[in-house]
Amino acid sequence: MLLDSNLNEIKEGKRITAKGYAVQHKDDTFKPFEFSRHALGESDILIEILYAGICHSDIHSARSEWHKGIYPMVPGHEIAGRVVAVGSKVSKFKVGDYAGVGCMVNSCGECEACKASNEQYCERGMVATYDCKDYCHNDEPTYGGYSNNIVVSEKFAVTVPQDAPLEKVAPLLCAGITTYAPLKFSKVKAGDKVAVAGFGGLGMMALKYAKQMGAEVFIFARNKNKEQDALKLGATKLYDTTDPKVVTERFDLIISTIPTPYDITAYLKLLKLGGEMGIVGLPPSEVDPKIGAQGLIFNAHKKVYGSLIGGMKETQEMLDFSLKHKIYPETEIIAANQINEAYENLTTGKAKFRYVIDMKTLEDN
Ligand code: NDP
Ligand code: ZN
């Protein structure tokens, strides 16, 4: 087995070999790919990846929709697995523990943001789990979770209890924290009216968390396909957003997870005075929605903010909160050779919520 050879590599202080799925350029399809990761440092852990979620950010990145990607690219930042080796100074994990890794694998550790455990807002920039030059390791490219293992500093891994359903834990590492963080930032409380725009992987988690926090939740989707799912998961109503202007309801908070072009101002009009709109959806750069002075002034005294994942402390808090209240994503398990199909479904409206790759299926290829 590959992991046995990994243990030999660790003994000899060598780089760690890995295999996964990669694209070689922005128009490519995913194919099996072998590569290596940096050697296990004294504060690092080696995780055998058991499940990896597919986030829409993986699609934006693989297709160079935000910036030119670093290829070959192995995406994946919703990682859950088992610790198979620990460095000499590791204190949080022991071999056999479950661990999760999200969108970051390092940061400078010294700036104000890092000191406040807002590593995602690190002044030097966080080291993203993939598609990033790792300044902590000679600028080598990072490779993500569509693979059999990952080496990561223990500081950037969260602890997962042994009885947790790992395939459901994986998507919490991005979809979970990215929606939990703005709900906390906006201090959502019982009785608030919260709208969630975009009802996919992130939107479904936003609905579940907002309900748990006592809010009344409304969904904005671009068709009524998922109306029954929304109602079943506790939403009061699902609106078809083809025309948000017809909506008469007013909200305390709108969380937008929309990954396509849309009219932000049309949503601002739906906020109560003093209401807030947290934007997490990140459409491609070429069609990045704009908001101008008029849009702001004629929607005055409403607040719009962006939110990027969450810090490591908050990610652990989110995970503990999710497990305590049994808030898990709606998932569909797929094999590694179905990634291309999953991408297709996620961009053509055929996907339901979160695809999660069962990494055992890597061995089949
Ligand atoms: P999904 O593809 O799972 O879900 C997106 C949902 O939005 C789909 O249900 C889609 O509907 C719906 N949608 C698309 N366009 C519209 C529209 N105009 N109006 C209403 N609904 C619409 O994506 P994810 O949930 O994984 O990710 C969502 C976005 O969040 C992405 O842009 C991603 O990059 C970003 N993201 C940002 C993070 C951050 O830290 N800020 C972290 C993680 C993700 P349909 O089924 O019809 O296509
Ligand atoms: Zn993500």
Image (spheres, rainbow, N blue to C red):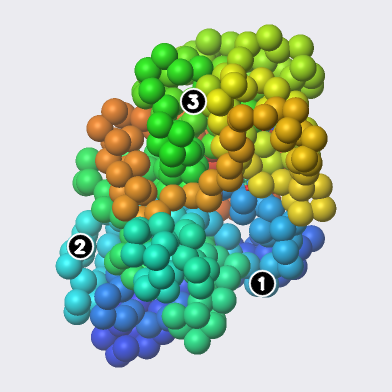
Q: Viewed as shown, does residue 171 lie left or right of 13?
A: right
Q: Earlier in the sequence, mark 2 or mark 3?
A: 2
Between 328 and 285, the one lying in front of the other is 285
The answer to whether residue 351 is seen in the rendering is no
User: Which residue does the image show at 20% across and 62% down from the upper left?
Assistant: 92
Find numbered disc 3 in the image and state the secondary structure of the residue it sits on.
helix
Q: Viewed as shown, does residue 58 lie left or right of 246?
A: left
Disc 2 versus disc 1: distance between alpha carbons? 32 Å
Find numbered disc 1 in the image and state the secondary structure of the residue it sits on.
loop
Q: Position of residue 130 (x, y in %)?
A: 55, 66
- Identified by mark 2, the residue type is Lys
- On screen, residue 160 above or below 123: above
Residue, disc 1: 70
Residue 92's label in the rendered image is 2
The yes-or-no answer for disc 2 within 8 Å of ligand 2 is no
Residue 271's label in the rendered image is none
